[in-house]
Image (spheres, grey):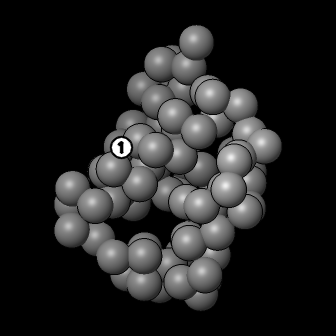
Amino acid sequence: MASIYSEQYQSVITALKKARKERGITQVQLAEALGRPQSFIAKIESGERRLDVVEFVHLARLVGLDPNRIINNIR
């Protein structure tokens, strides 16, 4: 399924997903840390659900990324 989101937005999601996997964090673990169901993370990573800025900051920090660095890399 093709995403309706911009290339820049998709690169943000890709970075979050890559960091999660590199750190060995499962979708379930990440969702639990946020107090959300696993489907919340799955929908974000698949493009079914868009992140708001607060969710983005929380997710980035939980997977060990600096939200500012990600934002500064958006072209």
Kindly identify the residue that appears in the image at 59 percent across and 39 percent down.
10
Kindly identify the residue that appears in the image at 33 percent across and 76 percent down.
26
Percent coordinates x, y for residue 17 in the rendering:
41, 54
Residue 15 as seen in the image, left or right of residue 34: left
Amino acid bearing label 1: Leu
Residue at the right extreme of this rendering: 4
Quick one: 2 or 38, which is closer to the camera?
2
- Using the rendered view, name the quadrant where residue 36 is placed: bottom right
Q: Is residue 61 visible?
A: no
Residue at the top extreme of this rendering: 75
Quick one: 68 or 3, which is closer to the camera?
3
Percent coordinates x, y for residue 42 in the rendering:
56, 72
- Using the rendered view, name the quadrant where residue 21 is placed: bottom left
Q: Secondary structure at mark 1?
A: loop
With respect to residue 37, does 68 lie above or below? above
Percent coordinates x, y for residue 61 in the rendering:
41, 52
Q: Label 1: how many residues lie within 10 Å, few (<14), some (14-19) or many (20+)?
A: some
How many numbered marks does the figure carry? 1
Q: Which quarter of the figure is the N terminus placed in?
A: bottom right
With respect to residue 24, does 69 lie above or below? above
With respect to residue 57, does 35 lie above or below? below
Q: Which quarter of the figure is the C terminus placed in?
A: top right
Kindly identify the residue that appears in the image at 21 percent across and 60 percent down.
23
Q: Which residue is mark 1?
A: 65
